[in-house]
Image (tube, rainbow, N blue to C red):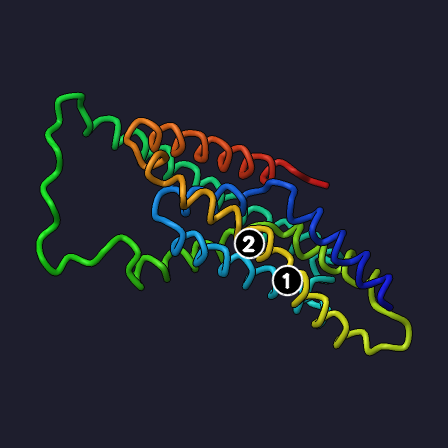
Amino acid sequence: MLNELAAFLGAALLIAMVPGPSTVVIVQRAARQGRRAGMATVLGNETGVLAWGLAAALGLSALLIASRVAYDTLRIAGAALLLWFGVRALWHSRRSSATTTPRTPPADPPPAGTPPADTPTTTGRCYRHGVMTSFANPKAGVFAVSFLPQFVPDGVSVPLALVALSVLWALVDLAWYTPIVWLAGGAGHILRRPRVRRALERLSGLVLVGFGLRLATDTT
């Protein structure tokens, strides 16, 4: 059982290390809005990961394998969401470029009582953004139903084991993304410079659009 657990943790870590839409969104949020926003996005993403795992435990993810219509519907919806995130990032970079000139005077300080960037509303928005990004990939559901059962020990209740493995999967993801958020948030004073921020927005927008187009055209 310990060998299976060690194998699962190693495999889950390798999977977390593969860059995907969640990585792009998390780094973007941490760089733009700080560590709190980045961690809120991570927690949202892990909520989605946990939900996919629980769906596998309940047998719901198997519907994505058995029903092509269900899979394609979720795939197109996820692709549209990623494309929206990407286009919005590109639009923000274009708008900030159009409204910023070399001689623009420093902005006046915000009025008294103006909430800081990392308010509960912003944090909640980042959390929802993370959840939606995780749900945007139907392959996560197919992956959960095909990956997690391989590590269920003999003689153990399969649903309970899948729930436990789902929690571990989310925790491994959290352990991987936390230092990434810390680094990206720490470099925020550089990444939030107008020129660097525009470049980051364009890069993340193009990557998200690429992920969306790939998901939309993937018929496997």
- Callout 1 amino acid: Trp
Which amino acid lies under the numbered mark 2 shown in the image of this protein? Answer: Ser
Q: Considering the numbered disc 1 on the image, is that residue within a helix, a strand or a loop?
A: helix
Question: Which quadrant of the figure contains the C terminus?
Answer: top right
Q: Residue at x 40, y 32 (%)?
A: 200
Could you say where residue 6 lies in the image, as x and y percent from the top left? 80, 59
Q: Where is the N terminus found, in terms of image quarters?
A: bottom right
Looking at the picture, how far across and down is residue 74, in whole percent?
59, 53
Numbered marks: total? 2
* Whether residue 118 is situated above or below residue 185 in the rendered picture: below
Q: CA distance from mark 2 to mark 1?
A: 9 Å
Left or right of 201: which side holds 173?
right
Mark 2 packing: few (<14 Cα in 10 Å), some, or many (20+)?
many
Q: Residue at x 32, y 32 (%)?
A: 93
In the rendered image, the residue lying farthest to the right is 154
Residue 66's quadrant in the figure? bottom right
Residue drawn at (40%, 44%) of the image: 186
Residue 113: quarter of image:
bottom left
Would residue 197 appear left or right of 57 to someone viewing this image? Answer: left
User: Decide: marks 2, 1 in contact (CB < 8 A)?
Assistant: yes
Q: Position of residue 209 (x, y in %)?
A: 49, 35
Residue under numbered circle 1: 52
Rendered image: mark on residue 134: 2
Mark 2 and mark 1 lie on one chain; the one further toward the N terminus is 1
Q: Residue at x 75, y 77 (%)?
A: 160
Residues 111 and 95: in front is 111
Q: How far across and how far down the image is residue 32, in percent?
A: 35, 43
Dot 1 crowding, Cα within 10 Å, few <14, some 14–19, many 20+: many
SS state under label 2 = helix
Mark number displayed over residue 195: none
When the figure is inspected, residue 19 is found, relative to residue 117, above or below; the finding is above
**Is 53 or 6 nearer to us in this picture?**
6
